[in-house]
Image: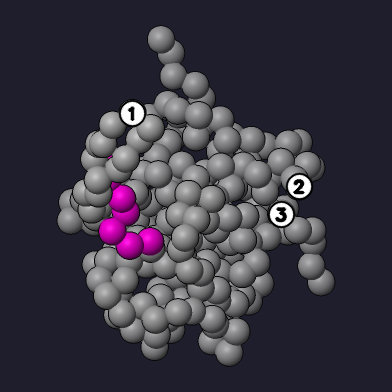
Amino acid sequence: MANSPSSASAAAAPTPANSDVLANIHVICAEPSIANHFLAELRDKDVQKDSLRFRRNLQRLGEIIAYRISTHLSYTDKAIQTPLAETTGKLLHDFPILATVLRAGLPFHQGFLNYFDQSPSAFVAAYRIEGTAQVQVQVDYMSAPSLDERVLILADPMLATGRSLVQTYRAMLRFGMPRQVHIAAVIASPEGLAYVAREIPEANLWVAAIDQGLNEQAYIVPGLGDAGDLSYGSKL
């Protein structure tokens, strides 16, 4: 059976060369699944005209990645009484803290929250100075619970240079040191993945797809455009 174009491009996408980096990178769309369909719709400039559908597809990919991350978390056995008999179930040991970068991260974040429905949330305002690779994190707009000895999932749809995610993570450490870190993105550049893996070696990195690279303005190519504008409308 032939692979779809989206899955073939995902499989052929460049990846960071360092084998130690690769060990912590999980690419969801490397194999054909419904995630490839959602990603293809996110990229399609005609489908993007429907902002509700765009947000929903970000949310769906958040749900899929949340499930994949859940297989790396700790569980506790508990006796469960059904109407017919007693059995044993596995319950999540503790729900992770879900953090995202405003505003583009909100639909993606909601997908994680749909699955980890008892998780506390953390929010960071970050923006990029247009036309450059420079990123400024507004720590004044940061809100988070204690991160000490918790599992942290930091989600941002686009991982371009990786500098905003690294700066965001470092700024969040004022709230404590997590025992486990997962960073999730929909689309990443090889350069950005390598940078984040080098600067936050303790993190597991989860992406739907790895694209070809960055252009001169440090935007991901082919990418999908501005996720925040496509979700909520253009800004001045």
Residue 65 showing in the rendered view: yes
Q: Amino acid at mark 1?
A: Leu
SS at badge 1: loop
- Along the viewing direction, whichever of 39 and 21 lies nearer the viewer: 39
Q: Is residue 15 left or right of residue 65?
A: left
The nearer-to-camera label among 2 and 1 is: 1
User: In this picture, is 55 found above or below 232?
Assistant: above
Q: Amino acid at mark 2?
A: Ser
Q: Amino acid at mark 3?
A: Ser
| Image quadrant where one finds the C terminus | bottom right
Range shown magenta = 89-95
Q: Which residue is mark 1?
A: 84
The nearer-to-camera label among 3 and 1 is: 1
Q: Which residue is mark 2?
A: 51
Quadrant assignment, res 220: bottom right
User: In this picture, is 86 found above or below 52?
Assistant: above
